[in-house]
Image (cartoon, rainbow, N blue to C red):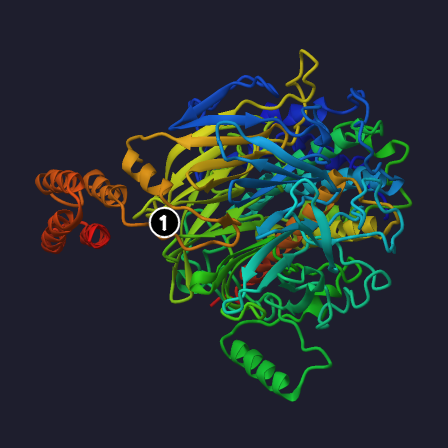
Amino acid sequence: MSQIVYVRRPFVRRIISLVGVTSLALAPAMHAQGGTASITDPRVGLHPGLTDAGVAAKNMELVSHRPKPDIFDGLGGPRGLTFANSDLAFRGNYVFQGNFSGFSIWDVANPGRPVLRKALLCATGQGDPSIYGNLLFISSEGTGDRLDCGTQGVQDRVSKDRMIGVRIFDISDMDHPRQVADVQTCRGSHTHTLVPDPTDKGIVYVYVSGSAQPRSPDEMPGCVNYPIDSLNSALFRIEVIRVPLAHPEQARIVNGARIFDALTAAKSHGNPPGDTLGRGGRGGRGNAFIGAFVEPLAPTATAVDSARFKATTDSLRAAGVPIVFRATLAAGRGGGRGNGGPSQCHDITVYPAIGLAGGACGGYGLLLDIHDPVNPKRIDFVGDSNFAFWHSATFSNDGSKLLFTDEWGGGTAARCRVIDPLNWGADAIFSLKDGKLTQGAYFKMPAAQTEQENCVAHNGSLIPVPGRDIMVQGWYQGGIDVFDFTDPTHPREIAYFDRGPIPNHPERADSSATGIVTGGYWCGYWYNGHIYASEIARGFDIFDLTPSEWLSQNEIDAAKLVHWNQFNPQSQPRIVWPAAFPVARSYLDQLVRGDGLAAARTSEIAKELNSAEKTTGAARASALTRLAVQLDGDAKNAADGARVWALAAAVRDLAKAAR
Amino acid sequence: MVATVAVAVCATTFRPLMREAGAQSAPSSSAADVHFMQGMIAHHAQALVMAAMAPTHGASAKVLLLCKKIAISQHDEIVMMQNWLTERNQRAPDPKDPHFNEMPGMPGMQDMMPGMLSAEQLEQLDQAKDTAFDRLFLTFMIQHHQGALTMVADLFASPGAGQGADIFRYATDVDADQRAEIGRMQLMLNSSSGSQSR
């Protein structure tokens, strides 16, 4: 019986012949869900090319482009992921760009002319970067990653040369980055996220999400896989590293936060259209999550733990939720390795200002309370049968929404073709209220891409337009997309930039014939007035937004007023706008666009703002105060009263600043 | 659309090596890497066979949708693995080749890949219809996916294996994706039994 027999038996031979048409046979089921990508979009049919690809852009323009530094193979053609560019971090006029073989530092004092300040070779997995003052943190996870940064790999299963975890460089001398610490972890670091200590300015924590197979305890004592219900297991936890900024060499792991424990309660997330898992159950009530994976306590648990555990499991049983012990699940085929539960997060985005984090964790999206950053606690979780792999998270600035991405296919596959539904490999927008997540709509880059373009939802950040939730996001070879998710049930695309596919063999005429060269935008982030984007194969791009029907010049100007000294996109800062006319005019533009206030009033308010701007000091202050009082009155009868209030507040800020 | 997918599967097999390895030294592929990729092609090919049964065996809408996702995902991954192998001058098995199972180096009598359905199981699945098919499909596909997790664990347990950036990324993706999909299939099984829905 132990052979592959399916081509030798007649009934299977028949099935084999179906393999090629699986997509056709299943297509009707797919079309009922989610919709399909546009084939008439200007992004469709772009000419392939590594350096000369066709381009389609709308409402944004490329300001500058730089190829990869030579030590990362320059534009040496397809080389798989070995020299792939990855994520970005920002400080002052510098952008830190990760690479699977090291990192680059770009001086962007003049965004039209970025200058490569330093490129350092260090084989390091995907090299997820973060910056904090002069400390540059780089994720390392490849089994061949070395303490000495060498590219020769590590052949031995147990080796003192292996470095998987978080590398810390001191970059105070940017020409000579210095390795000051290497914090080893059991599963390496696929991504990491910085969390500043809420009170002690001298401490920063690092949440580590590792995806490597846990390594041998002979290499790193204490690393064990099994039993997975052991509190020491490297599975089912995230590591928390504490870094004293003045003494980074003392950085060490202070907790293995077990945020997946008892991930079991029955859970409905509102059954969005197309979510087959969310349907069914008696009375049409959804059960997106039913009895999944509860772990038994470790033998070392205290009596208090036992009592708490028993109370929890009893209440779940009383509620009809089946409880499956990990040991039971793991005992199936696959030698005890077959547990289907989430064993790690892929990425965690923290929003320290509101004490919350969004964990994108394989098959789940988690909401974490991080008021005590050493001990993150799970407060809610969601699932979605349309999601293959929960990849990353972004909060709205007011914390009322949380957007998760689904990296279906892992980023190296073409997942934006006509056959790929618009709710697979997409963003899912959740409303967040009182610590509970409720699912809204999906957003996916809507233009059909080719078989040659790896494409799926990937990393992005907010664009700080007052009064709206706008995000820029990288979609690999699907390009850069800018969209509005202010209404979580009706996201809208605002701008995009897309290149044609990277040909597999640029030197050959039939170059677009086969295969995917992994490339495109790892991320697009807004930082201090521009969009910065890391192109995996082509290099580093900077964009500006241009005004359009759905984004006014005032709104762009207001976004440009927000400045940070440093920015790590997965450590989300709260956006605060200064007192400025473009901020007030942004709200006014939005009232006009959305018919939020009578047209007669909005044109009057525009005139008042213009004349106030021409005055100074006390005259300006009194004109603006008068206007603010009028706006208070307007708000009571306006279709969008909340926005009129926000405008009144912005006008009062301006009045205060004028005094 | 269909033709594109079908062509994509066969067009890339045995593509000659078009370029030399990069000038930079990089970890080269080990025998375990090649074994993993070749074995995973066979493993995925069987998943496609299983998924292809759904439309003709009365599968429910949600199982059809799951099969659609598995078919798209694993088709593409087979192409990716074939490319990976041909770029390293290794033989890339083609599931559409009628002699697929008889090629030297393919998992045969002695070592079927972990989790793969036996002949009896495959026949059992082919006999099942409607609700019974759904349940059997989910049960067998969970078994099948768990085998993939075992293959990943075995890969990384081999000295010097999984060192290249691409195979590391792919193998860890297989682990993460199939782990998540097992969870979803487990939920589907639980809900379909009816007794665990509230």
**Residue B196 image offset from top left, x and y in percent:** 53, 67
Q: Mark 1 packing: few (<14 Cα in 10 Å), some, or many (20+)? A: many
Above or below for A593 versus A142: above
Label 1 element class: loop
Is residue A25 found left or right of B34 in the rendered image? Answer: left
How many numbered markers are drawn? 1
**Residue A424 image offset from top left, x and y in percent:** 51, 42
Above or below for B158 versus A372: above
Please state which of residues A562 and A279 is positioned toward the viewer in this rendering: A562
**Residue A552 image offset from top left, x and y in percent:** 28, 35
What residue is shown with label 1? Answer: A488
Q: State which quadrant residue A506 falls in.
A: top right
Please state which of residues A63 and A133 is positioned toward the viewer in this rendering: A133
Write the residue at 59% across / 69% down. A374
Can you name the residue that lies furthest to the top here? A509
Please state which of residues A155 and B111 is positioned toward the viewer in this rendering: A155
Q: State which quadrant residue A400 falls in.
A: bottom left
Is residue A624 found left or right of A411 in the rendered image? Answer: left
Q: Chain of mark 1?
A: A
Above or below for A200 versus A484: below
Above or below for A647 versus B31: below
Q: Amino acid at mark 1?
A: Pro
Is residue A632 found left or right of A349 in the rendered image? Answer: left
**Residue A357 image offset from top left, x and y in percent:** 50, 60
